[in-house]
Amino acid sequence: MSENKIPPIQNPGLEQVIADLKDGSTNEKQIRLTAELKKAKLLSPCDFDVEIKPEQVGTIQNANPSQIKFYLINTNDGKTFFPVFTNIENAKKVNFGKDIKPKQVVREIKDYDALLKDPNGKAEGVIINPGADNIVIPKTMISLIAGTLQAPKPVVPKNAAPLNVHYVEPTVYPTKMAMCVYDRAEETNEIEKVWLKQKVIGNSGSFVFVVESNQHEERILNAIREVAVPNSKNVPIDVVFADEKALKDIVKDSTPLYDRNLDL
């Protein structure tokens, strides 16, 4: 191997969290995504008139930003984004047009933060691995990751009384949703029990499913969400595992909606 050869661009951490997000988004996954994007080296399709000499091995020296023209893509809803790729294999999957073979340069999120601040630009953010993962990162989030924009601090009204959270039995029992959750729990071998409660905060509320399982994997909670959400009639759905806090604060002495040990 030549000593000057640049290793291929790889972002295994970013690709892993993108794969995990396909099973459902959580706050922990979003934090991981932000952390990986801060250090990611992304391939950016572009065109330029700079001559690359053999000894440069794909790098561009003394190139002004005006010499590089980045490709843009439009989504079906008419929005425009910069396409970026986590590796060369993903970059090769996108066809930019007949006889168009874009060059690839390496850029970081901070570089796109600068590009997206162009007042004449049309792009609304970047889209990671278009045609495969299609992860959209809007320009505001890019500025937050790059550190050029600070997240606003929540405004807490003075003397605002805290809202009390109560967990009660559903005032109107969602029979169809409960039956669908029961059947899904029966099909999911890891699930032992499921409780259904209603969460009340002020004048709003949601349904809460507490799941007792011998494994704590996100796919188990997703199995309940998949059947509960379509039958919730737009009432928010929370699904959590039955840890010590959930059993004490939510379940209390309730009878489970589903119990694998009961033979009905």
Image: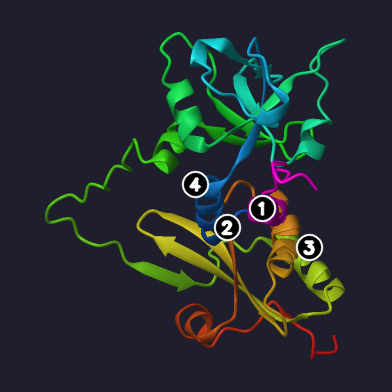
Above or below — where is 246 with respect to 182?
A: below
Circle 3 crowding by C-alpha within 10 Å: few under 14, some 14–19, many from 20: some
Q: Are marks 4 and 3 in contact (CB under 8 Å)?
A: no
- The answer to which of marks 4 and 3 sits earlier in the sequence is 4
- Given residues 104 and 163, the one toward you in this image is 104
- The answer to which of marks 4 and 1 sits earlier in the sequence is 1
- The answer to which of marks 1 and 3 sits earlier in the sequence is 1
Above or below — where is 45 with respect to 147?
A: above
> Does 73 sit left or right of 184 as displayed?
left
| Residue type at the position of mark 2 | Lys
Discs 4/3, front = 4
- Tell me the CA gap for discs 4 and 3: 41 Å
User: Residue drawn at (77%, 37%), measured in percent from left and top?
Assistant: 88
Is any atom of residue 58 visible in this view?
no
| Residue tagged 3 | 180
- Tell me the CA gap for discs 1 and 3: 25 Å
User: Residue drawn at (46%, 35%), measured in percent from left and top?
Assistant: 110
| Residue tagged 2 | 29
| Residue tagged 1 | 21
